[in-house]
Image (cartoon, rainbow, N blue to C red):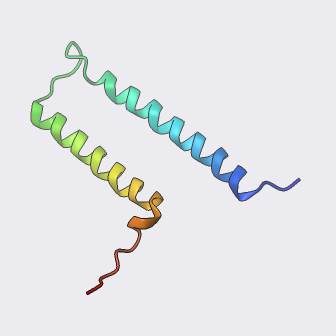
């Protein structure tokens, strides 16, 4: 039986989401000041980049945000 588009979405989205969550956990390991040294500015840059990309990606899933039409 051929995989439906919904099944394919679930399979791929779950795999990719789990990879992202795993990578975030690994990034969290960098907070260990016994092994790493960082500044507050470093942390702000990291999370700014993550939050920006998350916002862009989330907007792709929101149908109404795809096109804002101008009206008078």
The C terminus lies in which quarter of the figure?
bottom left
Measured as percent of width and height from the top left, residue 47 is found at: 24, 40
6 displayed left or right of 55:
right
- Residue in the foreground of this view, choosing between 45 and 71: 71
Measured as percent of width and height from the top left, residue 24 is found at: 38, 32
54 displayed left or right of 9:
left
- Residue in the foreground of this view, choosing between 64 and 21: 64
47 displayed left or right of 24:
left
Measured as percent of width and height from the top left, residue 42 is found at: 15, 36
- Residue in the foreground of this view, choosing between 33 and 61: 61
Residue for point 47% across, 58% down: 61
25 displayed left or right of 3:
left
- Residue in the foreground of this view, choosing between 72 and 6: 72
Residue for point 44% across, 59% down: 62
The image quarter containing residue 37 is top left
The image quarter containing residue 56 is bottom left
Q: In the image as oriented, which residue stretches furthest toward the right?
A: 1
Count every numbered label the image shows and give the total.
0
Q: In the image as oriented, which residue stretches furthest toward the bottom?
A: 72
Residue for point 21% across, 12% down: 34
Note whether 1 is above or below 66 in the view shown: above
Residue for point 46% across, 30% down: 22
Measured as percent of width and height from the top left, residue 35 is found at: 24, 16
Q: In the image as oriented, which residue stretches furthest toward the front?
A: 72
Note whether 35 is above or below 27 in the view shown: above
């Amino acid at each position: 039986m051929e995989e439906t588009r919904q099944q394919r979405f679930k399979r791929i989205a779950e795999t990719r989401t789990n990879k992202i969550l795993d990578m975030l956990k690994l990034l969290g390991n960098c907070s260990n000041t016994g092994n790493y040294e960082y500044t507050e500015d470093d942390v702000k840059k990291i999370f700014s980049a993550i939050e920006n990309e998350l916002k862009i990606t989330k907007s792709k899933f929101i149908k109404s945000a795809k096109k804002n039409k101008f009206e008078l």
